[in-house]
Amino acid sequence: MTSEAHAAVATDRPARYGKQLVAHLGRRNGGEWSADAESGWIDLGAGRATVAAGDGVLDLHLSAPADELARLQDVIGSHLVRFGERDELSVEWTKAI
């Protein structure tokens, strides 16, 4: 069974962090960032994430098997928080119902 979760991360530099996240996590299984669309995707093996830069926000959407969702949320969130440590980024996931 597939589950989904979403996070909206407030930042002044959403495209920068989106590109960095896709480039880093996409190395293993694949990922692509479109500078024109300011969005991308990451294949996480067990799941897939989409990343989109908005006005002052980086939107994250994760789709994965229910038993992998929490682990992948942690992987994405911890990397993004580490990348944005100076900007004090915070990732709070909301599970889709």
Image (cartoon, rainbow, N blue to C red):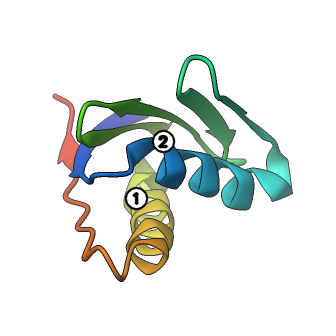
The Cα atoms of the two marked residues, 2 and 1, are separated by 20 Å
Please state which amino acid type lies under the numbered disc 1.
Answer: Gln
In this rendering, would 28 be left or right of 69? Answer: right
Q: Residue at x 52, y 51 (%)?
A: 16
Q: Quadrant of residue 3?
A: top left
Give the x, y percent position of residue 74: 41, 68
Q: Residue at x 62, y 56 (%)?
A: 20
Above or below for 38 versus 20: above
Q: Residue furthest front?
A: 12
Q: Residue at x 26, y 61 (%)?
A: 91
Q: Nearer the viewer, residue 12 or 77?
A: 12
Give the x, y percent position of residue 2: 44, 31
Location of the C terminus by quadrant is top left
Q: Are marks 2 and 1 in contact (CB under 8 Å)?
A: no
Give the x, y percent position of residue 86: 35, 82
Above or below for 35 versus 94: above
In this rendering, would 34 be left or right of 11? Answer: right
Q: Residue at x 28, y 52 (%)?
A: 12
Label 1 sits on a secondary structure element that is helix
Above or below for 94 versus 80: above
Label 2 sits on a secondary structure element that is helix
Please state which amino acid type lies under the numbered disc 2.
Answer: Ala
Residue where numbered disc 1 is placed: 73
Location of the N terminus by quadrant is top left
Q: Which mark is residue 45?
A: none
Q: Nearer the viewer, residue 96 or 86?
A: 86
Q: Nearer the viewer, residue 63 or 81?
A: 81
Residue where numbered disc 2 is placed: 15
